[in-house]
Image: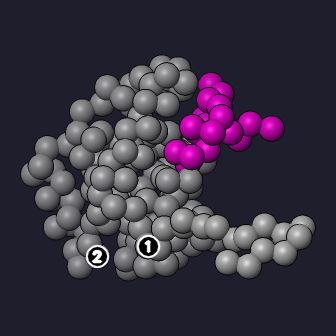
Amino acid sequence: MEVSKGTMPSISNAREGDMSAEELAQCLLDITSWLSENAGEPGKEYAAKPPPSPSDLASLADFLAPTPLPPSLSELLRLHDGGILLFEFTGLSVAEITQAVTDGRKEDKWAAGIVPVARNPDGELLVMDEEGLRTWTPADGKGSLDAPSLSAYLEQYSKRMLGGKLEYMEDCGIMEVA
């Protein structure tokens, strides 16, 4: 490697592709621990929330077909049936995902392949589609892309949490530290 005066070599260990199952499990553990310790009562409630039954998860997968249940969402739900705080959004339970899809299919802007993940107090959804994770509203349809996948979004969220870049504010959710 050649290094000239005044420059730094480019060193990177960036991952190619999504997290492994083990990395995702650690990421979700980090998020759950941070929420439990830093997000007041909502964080404690999320950490204590039980997972859905295996049959409920299987029913959700059947309901979404032919769209597959994304593995990262399946893993998130296997820990807790909804309730994760994602900035101003709150993760949906299996029943809430089913209802959101049912309601969404009645909207002109809904598209096949959309899988709702979370909802904010204004009714906007955080959804996954074939391109990644984005917002969705009945009025506007798909918003801009927030992340290439749910696991990539969760990974960056966890890094911000653990790096002291986020804080919980009651009635607002998780906010960036100025």
Question: Residue beneath label 1, please?
Answer: 17
Distance Cα–Cα, label 1 vs label 2: 21 Å
Q: Amino acid at mark 1?
A: Gly
Q: Quadrant of the C terminus?
A: top right
The residue drawn where x is 50% and y is 53% is 155
Q: Secondary structure at mark 2?
A: loop
Position of residue 152 measured from the top left corner of the image (x, y, whole percent)? 49, 61
Q: Amino acid at mark 2?
A: Thr
Which mark, by number, is residue 121?
A: none
Mark 1 packing: few (<14 Cα in 10 Å), some, or many (20+)? Answer: few
Would residue 159 be counted in the magenta stretch? yes
Q: Quadrant of the N terminus?
A: bottom right
Question: Residue beneath label 2, please?
Answer: 67
Position of residue 25 measured from the top left corner of the image (x, y, whole percent)? 32, 48
Q: Nearer the viewer, residue 128 or 124?
A: 128
Quadrant of the image occupied by residue 18 = bottom left
Q: Nearer the viewer, residue 35 or 171?
A: 35
Which region shows up in magenta?
A: 157-178
Q: Is residue 131 above or below residue 12?
A: below
Q: Residue placed farthest to the right in the image?
A: 6
The residue drawn where x is 14% and y is 59% is 58
Of badges 1 and 2, the one in the foreground is 1
Position of residue 17 measured from the top left corner of the image (x, y, whole percent)? 44, 73
Q: Secondary structure at mark 1?
A: loop
Does residue 48 appear left or right of residue 129 in this picture?
A: left
Mark 2 packing: few (<14 Cα in 10 Å), some, or many (20+)? Answer: some
Does residue 80 appear left or right of residue 129 in this picture?
A: left
Q: Are marks 1 and 2 in contact (CB under 8 Å)?
A: no
